Amino acid sequence: MIRLEGVSKEYAAGRPAVDNLTLEAATGEITVLVGPSGCGKTTSLRMINRMIEPTSGRILIDGRDTARVPAATLRRDIGYVIQHAGLFPHRTVLHNVMTVPRLNGWGRARAEARAREVLEMVGLPGDFGRRYPGQLSGGQQQRVGVARALASDPSVILMDEPFSAVDPVAREGLQDDILRLQAELGTTIVLVTHDIDEAIKLGHRVAVLRQGGVLAQFSSPADLLAHPADDFVADFVGRDRGYRALSFQHADVPVHPEEPVRLGQPLGRRSEEWLLAVDDGSRPQGWVVPAEVGEGPVRVEHLHRAGTVAPVDGALRALLDAALSSPSGRGVVVRDGVLAGTVRAQEVLSVIQQAPRPDGASIQGPESASATGQRP
Amino acid sequence: MIATIWAWLSDPTNWAGAGGIPAQSLEHLRLSLIALLAAALVAVPIGLYVGHTGRGRVVLVNVVSAFRAIPSLGVLFIAALLLLPHLRGNLAFELPSLIVLAVLGIPPILSGVYAGIEQVDPAARDAARGMGMTGWQRLWQVEVPCALPLICSGLRSSMMQIIATATIAAVVGLGGLGRFLIDGQANRKYDEMAGGAILVALLALVVDIVFSLVQRAVVSPGLASRGRT
Amino acid sequence: MTLLGTDLGEVAEFAAQHAYLAGVPLVLGLLISLPLGWLALRRRWLYPPVIAGTGLLYTIPSLALFVLLPGILGTQILDPVNVVVAMTLYTIALLTRTVADGLGSVPDHVRQAATAMGYGPVRRFFAVELPLAVPVVSAGLRVAAVSNVSIVSVAALIGVSQLGLLFTDGFSRSAMGPIVVGVLACVLLAVLFDLLILAVTRVLTPWLRAVRA
Ligand SMILES: Nc1ncnc2c1ncn2[C@@H]1O[C@H](COP(=O)(O)OP(=O)(O)OP(=O)(O)O)[C@@H](O)[C@H]1O
Ligand SMILES: [Mg+2]
């Protein structure tokens, strides 16, 4: 567990970058620091491995005051990942990853074996080890950065906007990998981002900081969306937080049986309505308009693929989205990829309506009007 | 013209003895390397210090550009006039020139080392610190290897400066290939002057090529492939 | 008027000759480096040979070049043209790479916008690329100017008249005065060149001042 106790940092006297911050990052969890630019996220993070010395306050890791440990020793036990990866351009990928184990006095062979292992874990097997950082894409470099932090198997990893310089598709992949690796290894991660979506996706707990390094709210993502502590947090969390909060809500929604047609076979019945086409394994493929198919078999060209597909036990957000995006108005739900039936938007909505409300969200006082983002 | 120069260059008597072409080439090389070593001993630590700590960079940048404006011939003469009366024997001819050679060789190395360290990717330095490297480890494992291309080119241009100035220094009595130019001038023998000039140019060229080969050997290929492959 | 036993009228005359020998090559070298650097940048395969070739020029020690040029050009050894040519070669050696890198530093989107507006390659070069490369080229020019002033004095060893003659003259008479005056005059001249280039750069790049202000 990492505990910040009344930690402050003043670069210039009288204007604190971080002000009396008290925070606990639980062992084996991802704690995210999020907030607008310049609010002191990086400063807070870097005080944990003493890249920046606090002006006052204490930082404890598993009860041990970090100020009592020599800075270099402390840092060798803490993984560190930064925005542009900061790989050493003159070392191969393999040697980059071997750096910390070697600093810790491991033998070459052992360090190398470990480096190959972690490179594999982040999805960069074999041949990548021989390359130089300049020969990798930005996303791959960031993976090496993560591998380098994992190499000495630290119990704590600090990450400062690790994915913000990576394109959105690569970023999703990296985020998923971090979630998977963290779950596997149980590493304690403190991650800084300015992207609230990333915070909500990755964090077990999210700390929202405001300008001057003041903690505005520290809670679970669901709680953050449901109960923003004040105007600032509400504003920061964003307009469609009501909708996003559904990502964390699960409830039973009535599933209607759906009579599908099979791809490659004739319709076999007349209908004015949209029909759902499935493949031989009953996996949904898309919607068809009977008039367009005519007498012949249903072919791929006939498919309308607009609708999204939700798992039957998915979050309310996915279910509602499936219903809203479907051309037929019937949202396709699957169980293990196989068609389970369809849901209706009204019914999902009425489930949402009946679900226990986050208190406060329904209060329509003049103050919370702005808190819910309905600004003039 | 070319025939007379060739005649001088191919005359075996010019290749023999202590004042012969091989001996003077070696002498030129020896003096230049001594001066380079002395210059490097001063410039490299200062450049590393300024680059690593960022302290005194304004002073350094200004000193380097001020040095460039000082005419080497003038300082050579000043050093010779100041020191000659106090020195005896061989040292009298070598020491003043060597000092000037070394001093003039300092600025290119200084700016190469400093600029090399300075331009190391801040993210790489930050990562090195964050993973628990000490100051020395960062310097030797990250900053110096990343700065090597610029350190090497600093050493190369310093060596070129030294070889050129060593040629001129023949006028205050220094040995080396410059002797042929200065003595030829004194004896109004253009073939000797031109032959010496060709030899000096060749020496400089060969040294530069050797240095570039060394550079290629010591600089990590990861730094060469800066862009993408 | 004299300073440290040196006639200042003579110094002024030497300084004028020195300025000519160092300044003219600066202009000539710039005029030659511009197309060379542009070519090296535009034709990628030309970059290594052009940069390496001009770089080699710089390895030739100045005294050797002063001595060899008369043989190559067919001029008298005392002819100032030798010095002008030699200094021009050094200027090219220093500037070509700077020009190539300076032009290369013009952002691609600017170049493409200019093309999209209908600039041909030549007009685009003069209207867009060259002005934007001015700061980088000017930095290179300043280095070349200062080193030219210093190198020209070496030509005194072959008897070409300029401030360097104060050095040879002083040394032959074991008189420190003229040498010190000569060094000071050289440094002063270098500073003047530097200021001149800075002033011209300022005039040519009004947008930089506007941003700073
Ligand atoms: N070395 C420093 N010296 C002086 N002030 C600093 C220094 N580092 C940061 N600050 C100031 O401290 C405040 C917090 O900076 P910090 O880098 O922690 O912000 P951040 O939340 O990480 O911002 P961003 O999202 O832009 O990275 C800012 O106002 C910044 O200007
Ligand atoms: Mg930051």
Image (cartoon, coloured by chain):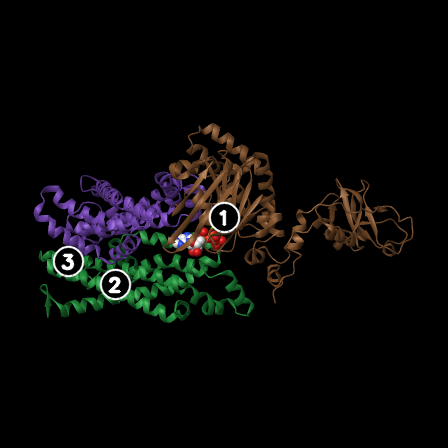
Picture quarter with the C terminus of chain A: bottom right
Residue beneath the point at 15% across and 54% down: B77
Alpha-carbon distance for marks 1 and 2?
Answer: 45 Å
The residue that mark 2 highlights is C190
Q: Which chain is green?
A: C
Q: The brown chain is which one?
A: A
Q: Is residue B47 left or right of residue A25?
A: left
Q: Mark 2 and mark 3, same subunit?
A: yes
Between residue A258 and residue C47, name the one nearer to us.
A258
Residue beneath the point at 48% across and 59% down: C42
Dot 2 or dot 3, earlier in sequence: 3
- Check the image and report above or below for C4 versus A348: below
Q: The purple chain is which one?
A: B
The dot on residue A194 is none
- Check the image and report above or below for C35 versus A250: below
Q: Mark 2 lies on which chain?
A: C
The residue that mark 3 highlights is C168
Q: Position of residue A336 (x, y in %)?
A: 75, 39
Q: Mark 1 lies on which chain?
A: A
Alpha-carbon distance for marks 2 and 3?
Answer: 20 Å
**In the rendered image, which quarter is residue A361 located in?**
bottom right
Between residue C92 and residue A353, name the one nearer to us.
A353
Q: Position of residue B223 (x, y in %)?
A: 44, 45
The residue that mark 1 highlights is A83
Q: Which chain carries label 3?
A: C
